[in-house]
Image (tube, rainbow, N blue to C red):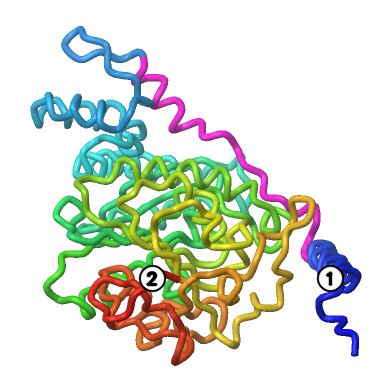
Amino acid sequence: MTSFDTSPQLNVWRALLALAVVFVMLATTGWTALRTHRESTAVQASLTKWEHGRLHGVPLPDPGAAPARLTRFYASLTPEEQGRLAHRYPLAVGNMNGAPVALRYRANRVALDQARKVERTRMHDSRLSPAGQQDAGRRMHRYESLLEPGRHILAFDPDGSGRIAEVFGNLDRAERISVVVPGVDTDLLTFQKSYRQYTAPVGMAKALYSAERAARPGTRTAVIAWADYTSPDGLGVDAATGLRAAEGAVRLNALLDALPGRTPVAMICHSYGSVVCGVAAHGMPRRVTDIAVAASPGMRVTKASHLDTTARVWAMRDATDWIQDVPYLELGGLGHGADPVSSAFGARVLSAHDAQGHAGYFQPGTDSLRNLAAVGVGAYDAVTCAQENDACRSGLPGTATAGRA
């Protein structure tokens, strides 16, 4: 009997059907519903001011110089001189890879306070519509929240929908660093939520930080909630292509290249964030030991080995996650490639039991969060594989098995 499962004709029809599903999805969710973005005028204005600035009559270094060059520059300054730069060029210093972490926090507090005052004025601007005034009020309250004592803002850009990154833990002293890369609809206003808090970057990072400390209490950890890229707006064409991922990958690798010390780094990437991590993977520094993706629509490759990274690649998906119904292919720039939890892809597949759908992977008490935390701190002996005989533990430090997934 002839098998039709492997026939080229059927494979073509499957691909065409999947592509049709993509077009239907785009038509129903808004083919033209692309988010409009303004150029980052505030950050650029601060950088331009820096480029024309001087300290004791000496020109300041190129703000786009290698992080190591900028690190040496800041190390040559007194604390008073560093503080002067943070107050004079807050957005430049607050987003400058190579600037000391504590100084970036300080500069971003200055920038946030300035932005808060701008929005407070806009709230009462009669030239704005009621909706515009309301938006200004929401942004002002978000800035007030970010200015609360104890918050460590590593990056901040108020323009457009906004970009931001926050650190939990001591980044300078950490023995393990995890970077949470979120997916669609992430901006300044959705960075943190009171309702369903673990579906937003701040809640994700807080939950991961707590779970990592529980997994290895003796290990100093730090977690970065990284929303410092322009994510797609909803499930339109933006989310079905790699444009935002390509832009985000450049920014992500710039951050990774500038992280302090030599501490191992784990990437924890959710939904479209896994597309960003997939595109960025080949350019990540070797200190990135692990890339774990949850609820992934694909990483824009057909196999994990095509990511061209030395990092271990992990994947998980809950059985109730709607993302499994998205066509796992890439045709004409649409779609993000193979399914990362498929056996053919070659990732180490982790259990996501009790993840509660597409947005529930960071919910405390779930297998998904425990597994992501175990990967984050290198507690590989504690991971729970998706299947009993899965090879996801093969070749890991501290395990008895050999080989590599």
User: Eyeballing the image, is 40 above or below 17?
Assistant: above
User: Eyeballing the image, is 249 above or below 203?
Assistant: above
The residue nearer to you, when weighing 116 against 269, is: 269
Q: Residue at x 90, y 85 (%)?
A: 2
**Amino acid found under the numbered disc labelled 1:** Asn
Q: Quadrant of residue 5?
A: bottom right
Residue 109, percent from left and from top: 28, 44
Residue 166, percent from left and from top: 33, 55
| Comes first in the chain, label 1 or label 2 | 1
Mark 1 burial class by Cα count in 10 Å: few <14, some 14-19, many 20+: few
Residue 331, percent from left and from top: 78, 56
Q: Report which residue position mark 2 lands on.
A: 203
Q: Which residue is drawn at 58% across and 69% down?
A: 345
Q: Are marks 1 and 2 in contact (CB under 8 Å)?
A: no
Report the mark closest to the observer, 1 or 2: 1
User: Eyeballing the image, is 120 above or below 170?
Assistant: above
In the figure, is residue 330 to the left or right of 342?
right
Q: Is residue 47 magenta?
A: yes
Q: Is mark 2 on a helix, strand or loop?
A: helix
**Amino acid found under the numbered disc labelled 2:** Gly
Q: Is mark 1 on a helix, strand or loop?
A: helix
Residue 111, percent from left and from top: 34, 39
Q: In which quarter of the image is residue 121?
A: top left
The residue nearer to you, when weighing 317 against 393, is: 393
Q: State which quarter of the image contains the C terminus.
A: bottom left
Residue 11's disc number: 1
Q: Does the magenta stretch include residue 94?
A: no
Q: State which quarter of the image contains the N terminus.
A: bottom right
Q: Residue furthest top?
A: 57
In the figure, is residue 209 to the left or right of 121?
left
Residues rendered magenta in the picture: 29-51
